[in-house]
């Protein structure tokens, strides 16, 4: 949203209850995307037994950036996500996390207006 100050907060700042990335979140689409991305990243790293240091070497993404994404401390940019996906050979970007909220809305059928 234009003028929205939510980017000043970290994704994990939207946690209402529980621990990141499995926590219940406030109603914030970006935080839910970041949450699902962090969970997918952690799962992929675990399945492939790759550390943040090793993934950093494979992807060109700084190890601390990877740790921050996993911790919900940053909003990862597209190049970071793309490089991690390429290195892991796995999709990290989540499916639309709020699809159920859009049932019957103009956004889902593509008829909504875009500013």
Image (cartoon, helix red, strand yellow):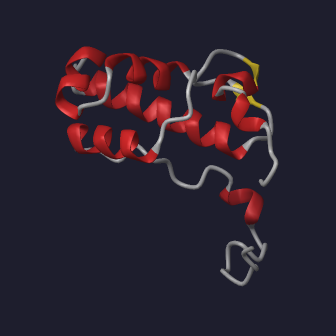
| Residue displayed at 64% across by 15% down | 19
Left or right of 48? Residue 61 is: right
Q: Is residue 73 above or below residue 106?
A: above
Q: Quadrant of residue 111?
A: bottom right
| Residue displayed at 21% across by 38% down | 87
For the residue pair 9 and 105, the one nearer the viewer reads as 9
For the residue pair 69 and 15, the one nearer the viewer reads as 69
The total number of labels drawn is 0
Q: x and y percent of residue 10 in the render?
A: 66, 26
Q: x and y percent of residue 24 in the render?
A: 72, 27
Residue found at the very far front of the displayed protein? 3
Residue found at the very far bottom of the displayed protein? 111
Q: x and y percent of residue 36 in the render?
A: 54, 37
Q: In which quarter of the image is residue 59?
A: top left
Q: x and y percent of residue 81 in the render?
A: 39, 42
Q: Is residue 78 above or below residue 56?
A: below
Left or right of 109? Residue 65 is: left
Looking at the rendered image, the quarter that the C terminus falls into is bottom right
| Residue displayed at 78% across by 54% down | 2
For the residue pair 82 and 101, the one nearer the viewer reads as 82
| Residue displayed at 80% across by 45% down | 4
Q: Is residue 71 above or below residue 103?
A: above
Left or right of 62? Residue 3 is: right
Left or right of 58? Residue 102 is: right
């Amino acid at each position: 949203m234009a003028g929205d100050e939510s980017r000043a907060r970290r994704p994990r700042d939207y946690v209402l209850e529980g621990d990141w990335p499995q926590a219940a979140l406030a109603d914030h689409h970006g935080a839910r995307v970041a949450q699902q991305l962090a969970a997918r990243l952690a799962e992929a790293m675990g399945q492939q037994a790759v550390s943040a240091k090793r993934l950093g070497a494979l992807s060109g993404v700084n190890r601390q950036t990877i740790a921050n994404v996993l911790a919900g401390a940053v909003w990862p940019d597209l190049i970071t996500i793309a490089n991690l996906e390429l290195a892991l050979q796995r999709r990290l970007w989540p499916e639309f996390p709020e699809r159920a909220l859009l049932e019957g809305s103009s956004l889902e059928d593509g008829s909504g207006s875009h500013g």
